[in-house]
Image (tube, rainbow, N blue to C red):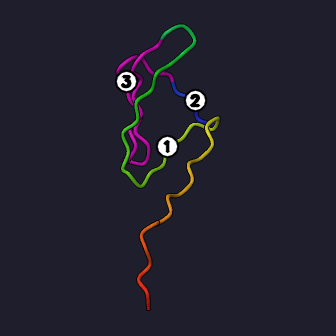
Amino acid sequence: MLVLSRKIGEEIVIDEEVVVRVLKISGSRVQLGFIAPPEIHIRRPEVPPRREKRDLSPTPAP
């Protein structure tokens, strides 16, 4: 695991595509902002992943 220290307003760039910025530090909590392309999925491990939306449009009759 790589461990880095950052101050408010500082950033970390991952693979030239994802930017992680420290927005706020309050006690033991850190608020992070993420900038990433839409194909990069960012999620919190404590939140279950979203299910894929199914295409519910009517299927044309043969």
Kind of element beneath mark 3: loop
Do the residues under discs 2 and 3 have CB atoms within 8 angstroms? Answer: no
Horizontal arrangement in the rendering, residue 28 relative to residue 11 (left or right): right
Which residue is at 38% across, 51% downward?
A: 38
Horizontal arrangement in the rendering, residue 25 relative to residue 19 (left or right): right
Which residue is at 49% across, 9% downward?
A: 26
- Sort mark 1 into few (<14), some (14-19) or many (20+) by Cα contacts within 10 Å: few
Do the residues under discs 2 and 1 have CB atoms within 8 angstroms? Answer: no
Amino acid at the residue labelled 2 = Val
* Looking at the image, residue 9 lies above or below residue 38: above
Q: Which mark lies nearer to you, 3 or 1?
A: 1
Separation of residues labelled 3 and 1 (CA atoms): 19 Å
The label on residue 3 is 2
The label on residue 10 is 3
Q: Mark 1 — residue?
A: 42
Q: Which mark lies nearer to you, 2 or 1?
A: 1
Do the residues under discs 3 and 1 have CB atoms within 8 angstroms? Answer: no
Earlier sequence position, callout 2 versus callout 3: 2
* Looking at the image, residue 13 lies above or below residue 25: below
Q: Position of residue 23 (x, y in %)?
A: 39, 21
Q: Residue furthest top?
A: 27
